[in-house]
Amino acid sequence: MPTLEEEITQKTFRNEGQKAIINIIYTGNWLTARHNKLLKSFNLSEQQFNILRILRGQRPKTASLLLLRERMLDKMSDVSRLVERLRKSGLVEREVCIHDRRSVEVVISEQGLTLLAEVDKHINKLDKLSQRLSPEELVMLNTLLDKVRG
């Protein structure tokens, strides 16, 4: 497997910290590109997929737009617009909250669950990328990434 230096054709870095940050960004983009390619075949964006997964985890309870926004991986997403697009596709259902008419509650539809089950069959291929690391290395990687954000 090529090194970061080979991938981006850069021989030196200011220090190991700079190299690590660039490596995280590069690797994140590399993984995102593969993830997006898979989701595109299901006519889903990464953000739409994220909402569907959150709603599946909430099921059978509904989720408010605020809850979805808080749990999104991409905090800059326009949740209202994403939910509306998913609703028009029949993947989620929306209802006005009986306790607060200004609030909207969202639940994943059967069609949304079916689509996620189909995506899950293929997403396992991406999960295999992590098999390049041992279970101990994966724990360490997660710990280090948490520490960077710390």
Image: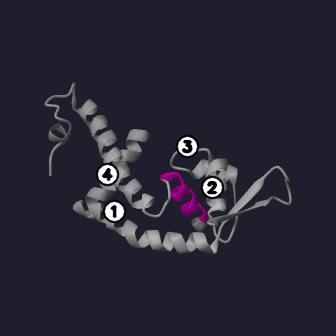
In the image, is residue 41 part of the stretch drawn in magenta? no
Magenta segment boundaries in residue numbering: 46-55
The amino acid beneath tag 2 is Arg
How far apart are labels 2 and 1 at the CA level? 26 Å
Q: Nearer the viewer, residue 150 or 116?
A: 116
Which of the two labelled residues, at mark 3 and mark 4, occupies the earlier sequence position? 3
Classed neighbour count for the residue bearing mark 2: other residues with Cα under 10 Å, few (<14), some (14–19), many (≥20): some
Position of residue 112 measured from the top left corner of the image (x, y, whole percent): 58, 69
Name the mark on residue 126: 1
How far apart are labels 1 and 3 at the CA level? 23 Å
Classed neighbour count for the residue bearing mark 1: other residues with Cα under 10 Å, few (<14), some (14–19), many (≥20): few
| Label 1 vs label 4, nearer the camera | 1
Q: Which residue is mark 4?
A: 141
52 horizontally vs 20: left or right: right
Position of residue 80 measured from the top left corner of the image (x, y, whole percent): 67, 49
Above or below 88: residue 31 = above
Which of the two labelled residues, at mark 2 and mark 1, occupies the earlier sequence position? 2
| Label 2 vs label 1, nearer the camera | 2
Above or below 115: residue 145 = above
How far apart are labels 1 and 4 at the CA level? 17 Å
Which of the two labelled residues, at mark 4 and mark 2, occupies the earlier sequence position? 2
Secondary structure mostly seen in magenta is helix
Quadrant occupied by the C terminus: top left
The amino acid beneath tag 3 is Lys
Name the mark on residue 75: 3
The amino acid beneath tag 1 is Leu
Q: Which residue is mark 2?
A: 85
How far apart are labels 4 and 2 at the CA level? 35 Å
| Label 3 vs label 2, nearer the camera | 2
Q: Which type of secondary structure does the marked residue at label 1 adopt?
A: helix
